[in-house]
Amino acid sequence: MPTILDIQNLQKTYNSGDRHLTVLQGINFSLQAGDVCAIVGPSGSGKTTLLGLCAGLDRASSGSVILNGIKLDNLSEDERAQVRNQYVGFIFQNFQLIPTLTALENVMVPMELRGEKNVQKQALELLGRVGLAERHDHYPTQLSGGEQQRVSLARAFSNKPAILFADEPTGNLDEETGERVEKLLFDLNRESGTTLVLVTHDLELAEKTDRIIRIKGGTLVSDQVTSSVINSDYNE
Ligand SMILES: Nc1ncnc2c1ncn2[C@@H]1O[C@H](COP(=O)(O)OP(=O)(O)OP(=O)(O)O)[C@@H](O)[C@H]1O
Ligand SMILES: [Mg+2]
């Protein structure tokens, strides 16, 4: 399998005034296309920051992010936006839906940016998969947190990403909806070979992935193949 994500000696420092806060220091790992990986670690350890850098939403202070063979480090904001639209899906911890657009319109945006046809039909199908077809004309403020999260999921799927980053994708959901979302993510991986990178506090979910990367205080403290993979290898 080709390498889809290569992270080399990644460092991120936030500067505000004369204060410098280094939140990631020297992170290294790489993922092959189709991998399913969980990133875990305490609150404030740098998981969301790391995901944002991997997805090209933000720029590192030093080090490299190579996504699908494209080095993101020196690209402009516009160039990174193009790479994201072409290859990346992102489910934000705080959803980040566009408040002036309905659920359906939010899901249609990435497809419209790609110039796709029949986007309304596809977007309705995606909303159906997350159980929200009837709520398609609701605005984000008219939806619960879990419902907004599911719209965000449908939007992340809509540009058929090569790699999907999900920041706490089941964090705001009840058990049943969480399981449905989990199944959707894993189905996407199986059906389309989408690489998945999940940040989660849910260790049961993390154990279902192939690999768990642990972050603490901005450093990578372990990178383990999970027992689910070891078990399935034994079963083959
Ligand atoms: N834009 C910013 N400016 C300054 N500091 C920031 C900024 N964004 C994040 N931080 C700090 O960076 C550190 C890592 O934040 P991050 O959001 O990556 O943590 P996290 O591991 O995702 O935590 P959680 O599990 O609570 O979501 C925190 O101390 C946070 O306060
Ligand atoms: Mg976070």
Image (tube, rainbow, N blue to C red):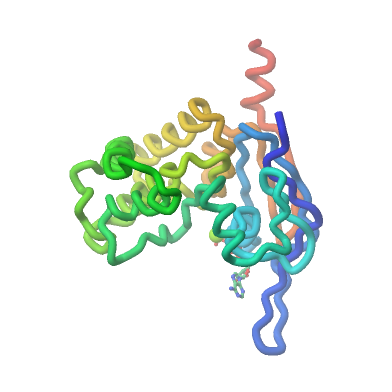
Residue nearest the observer in this picture, 162 or 39? 162
User: Does 228 sit above or below residue 201?
Assistant: above
Count numbered badges in the picture.
0
What x and y, as percent, mark residue 118?
Answer: 30, 40
Q: Quadrant of ligand 1?
A: bottom right
User: Does 119 sit above or below residue 97?
Assistant: above
Residue nearest the observer in this picture, 54 or 183? 54
Tell me where residue 154 sits by quadrant: top left
Residue nearest the observer in this picture, 161 or 199? 161
What x and y, as percent, mark residue 89?
Answer: 50, 48
What x and y, as percent, mark residue 29?
Answer: 75, 46
Q: Is residue 107 visible?
A: yes
Q: Which residue corresponds to the image point at 72% horizontal and 37% vertical from the top-left?
A: 3
Q: Is residue 43 visible?
A: no
Q: Which residue corresponds to the image point at 72% horizontal and 61% vertical from the top-left?
A: 73
Q: Which residue corresponds to the image point at 60% horizontal and 35% vertical from the top-left?
A: 36
Q: Is residue 27 left or right of residue 156?
A: right
Return the residue found at the far bottom: 18
Q: Which residue corresponds to the image point at 56% horizontal and 55% vertical from the top-left?
A: 82
User: Does 48 sit above or below residue 224?
Assistant: below
Q: Quadrant of the N terminus?
A: top right
Tell me where residue 101 sits by quadrant: bottom left
Q: Quadrant of the C terminus?
A: top right
What x and y, as percent, mark residue 197?
Answer: 59, 44
